Image: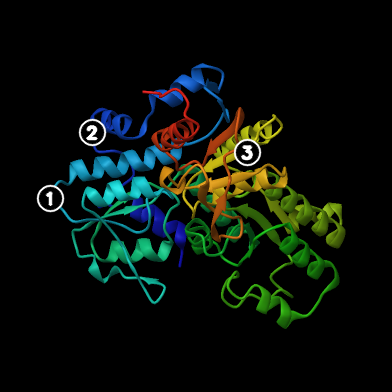
């Protein structure tokens, strides 16, 4: 399938919408009332710090909603206003935040359910409106919805689209796309659908395994078993790793993506020589600015004296998990929560560990004066951050904040 030609044809279809519907100001007022926070603005204005009673809050200088997320949520709200009586579906969560997705359900936006690990599009009929979320949708899903005669509202973040354009460039010169990402993540599934040959590596360790195979050979069957769910159909490591290009899931750790890119560049230079490098290796900058800014701000925050960190974001949010990873590597006690309800009491907090397990920790809130670091993922509204901060103030019997 010529994915580039399909996407171009879809974008020129009268059923395809990638801009708003003229309700921008009305929707902005609604979004501000539902998701913005006066307390968070106060902390921003006070050099990202606020003390109430025994609690000092230190807020990361870049956190929360990014431009792409704001745009996606605003378009979803506009879609509901523009199509007040039509059936509206979304192919996945609009963003990885439970409160925002719950709000859309309350607005009668249906979420496509899974049957045997496959999305059940049988519920979608001709003329229905279908929203593609911020991290995109696979080209196969777009084609299915187009063939059904649906009205498609595409909220895909432009940074994600940039990665799609990159793998299209790889395909044009017959390069295998090495995608730094999680093969189950919706964004990586979408990106790989636009690629030709591809291989998904989760981390530097997997990248080193691949580059060792390129330089030294190895057990082909072992390689294919290791990446059985993370490579294109018919992938052959003995022939498909001669020309490679680097791409990434936009929410991965910036530093690790850069390390992986440099590793493959060095490997291809060693294998084929400096003069042949450009014939065997391609790299374009596809690291999302917002992801980079939030990670950089977190790296700065964890250098301060903190008693513990609260990282706020959806439990299935990749960029939030990577913020938590920074705190863990710094050996700062930290708790990844998706809402204020996870703070059960002054003694117990329910939180997500890096391995994905949910646990309850006891005695998480120290006595006396404390300094608390706070950050949130790119899909987290300020209002959710405010709720968490207020809960800490309340538990420490701090001055009430209105």
Alpha carbons under labels 1 and 2: distance apart: 16 Å
Instruction: Please report the residue visible at 34 percent of the width from the left and 44 percent of the height from the top.
Output: 18
Who comes first in sequence, dot 3 or dot 1?
1
Residue named by callout 3 = 308
User: Element at badge 3?
Assistant: strand
What element does badge 1 sit on? loop
Residue at the (32%, 66%) spot, across then down: 113
Expressed as whole percent of the image width and height from the top left, the position of residue 225 reads 66, 79
**Residue 8 locus on image (x, y percent):** 39, 53
Residue corresponding to mark 1: 85
Q: How far apart in space, not on screen, are marks 3 and 1 (Cα)?
A: 48 Å
Q: Position of residue 181 (x, y in %)?
A: 60, 57
First in sequence, mark 3 or 2: give its number.
Answer: 2
Give the crowd class for mark 3: few <14, some 14-19, many >=20 residues within 10 Å.
Answer: many
The relative height of residue 176 versus residue 166 in the rendered view (above or below) is below
- The image's mark for residue 23 is 2
């Amino acid at each position: 399938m010529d994915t580039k030609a399909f996407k171009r044809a879809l974008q020129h279809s009268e059923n395809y919408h990638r801009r708003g519907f003229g309700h921008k100001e009305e929707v902005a007022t609604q979004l501000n009332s539902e998701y913005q926070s006066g307390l968070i603005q106060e902390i921003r204005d006070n050099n990202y710090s606020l003390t109430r009673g025994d609690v000092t809050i230190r807020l990361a200088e870049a956190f929360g909603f990014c431009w792409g997320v704001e745009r996606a949520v605003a378009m979803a709200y506009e879609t509901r206003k523009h199509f007040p009586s039509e059936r509206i579906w979304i192919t996945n969560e609009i963003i990885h935040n439970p409160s925002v997705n719950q709000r859309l359900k309350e607005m009668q936006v249906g979420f496509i359910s899974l049957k045997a690990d496959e999305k059940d599009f049988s519920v979608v009929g001709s003329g229905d409106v279908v929203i593609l979320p911020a991290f995109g949708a696979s080209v196969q899903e777009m084609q299915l919805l187009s063939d059904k005669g649906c009205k498609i509202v595409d909220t895909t973040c432009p940074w994600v689209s940039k990665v799609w354009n990159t793998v299209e460039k790889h395909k044009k010169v017959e390069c295998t796309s090495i995608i730094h990402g999680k093969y189950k993540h919706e964004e990586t599934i979408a990106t790989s659908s636009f690629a030709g040959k591809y291989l998904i590596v989760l981390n530097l360790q997997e990248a080193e395994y691949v580059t060792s195979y390129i330089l030294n050979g190895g057990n082909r069957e072992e390689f294919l078993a290791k990446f059985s769910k993370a490579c294109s159909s018919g992938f052959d490591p003995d022939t498909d790793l001669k020309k490679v290009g680097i791409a990434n899931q936009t929410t991965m750790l910036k530093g690790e993506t850069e390390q992986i890119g440099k590793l493959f560049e060095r490997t291809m230079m060693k294998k084929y020589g400096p003069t042949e490098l450009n014939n065997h290796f391609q790299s374009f900058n596809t690291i999302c600015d917002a992801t980079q800014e939030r990670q950089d701000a977190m790296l700065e925050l964890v250098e301060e004296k903190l008693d513990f960190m609260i990282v706020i974001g959806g439990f299935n949010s990749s960029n939030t998990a990577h913020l938590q990873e920074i705190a863990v590597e710094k050996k700062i006690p930290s708790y990844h929560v998706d809402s204020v309800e996870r703070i059960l009491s002054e003694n117990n907090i329910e939180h997500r560990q890096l391995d994905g397990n949910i646990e309850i920790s006891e005695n998480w809130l120290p006595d006396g004066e404390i300094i608390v670091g706070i950050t949130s993922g790119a899909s987290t509204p300020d209002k959710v951050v405010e709720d968490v901060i207020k809960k800490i103030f309340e538990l420490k019997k701090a001055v009430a904040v209105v």
